[in-house]
Image: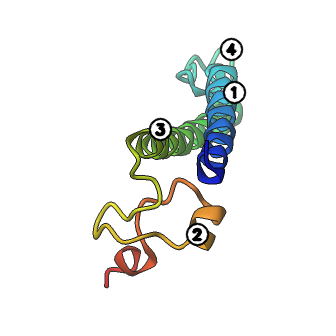
Amino acid sequence: MTASDIELDALKQVMNRRLDDLYQATDSTAASRKPVELDQASVGRLSRIDAMQMQAMAMAAERLRGHEIERIKAALKRIDDGDFGACVTCGEDIAPKRLSVDPTISTCIRCASGG
């Protein structure tokens, strides 16, 4: 096993732990994303508005988690396929510093900036 393989294994472990954390967060916030009860007899108008706002924020956070989960899964697939570190657009190497900031990055800086 090469040093590069060891680094990729460590990176996979980190990404898999992050996936576990994201899935746990999704499970633990499921109740806050449920529809808000509109019965004015049990909940006042301002409380209902506050609950709807909290629900909207929880749903937005869930969407962000979903996007992050998909990016991590795609990065793990690129590792398994042997394509990790190569730009999916042009095929050139992605700068190691760029990957160290976010290992789910799939494009080089040139392609990411549209150039």
Nearer mark to the viewer, of 1 and 2: 2
Residue 36 disc label:
none
Look at discs 4 and 2 and give the one toward the viewer.
Answer: 2
For marks 3 and 2, give the CA distance: 20 Å
Disc with the residue nearer the chain's start (1 vs 2) = 1
Find disc 3 in the rendering and name its residue. Answer: 73
The amino acid type of the residue labelled 3 equals: Lys
Q: Which of marks 4 and 2 is nearer the N terminus?
A: 4
Tell me what residue is drawn at x 47 percent, y 38 percent.
73
Q: In which quarter of the image is the C terminus?
A: bottom left
Disc ID at residue 96: 2
Which residue lies at the image location 57% right of the left edge and 56% below the top edge?
A: 103
The structure residue drawn at horizontal position 69% and vertical position 31%, both measured from the top left corner, is 21
The image shows residue 24 at horizontal and vertical percentages of 68, 24
Q: Name the residue under label 1.
A: 44
Q: Quadrant of residue 53?
A: top right
To which quarter of the image does residue 111 belong? Answer: bottom left
Of the residues under marks 1 and 3, which one precedes in the sequence?
1
How far apart are the two marked residues, 3 and 4, measured between alpha carbons? 43 Å
Q: Is mark 2 on a helix, strand or loop?
A: helix
Q: Nearer the viewer, residue 80 or 60?
A: 80
Whichever of callouts 3 and 2 sits on the residue coming sooner in the sequence is 3
Q: On screen, 12 above or below 31?
A: below
CB-based contact (under 8 Å), mark 3 and mark 4: no
Where does label 4 land, which residue? 42
- The percent position of residue 9, horizontal first and vertical second, equals 63, 40
Q: Distance between the residues labelled 1 and 4?
A: 7 Å
> Which quadrant is the N terminus positioned in?
top right
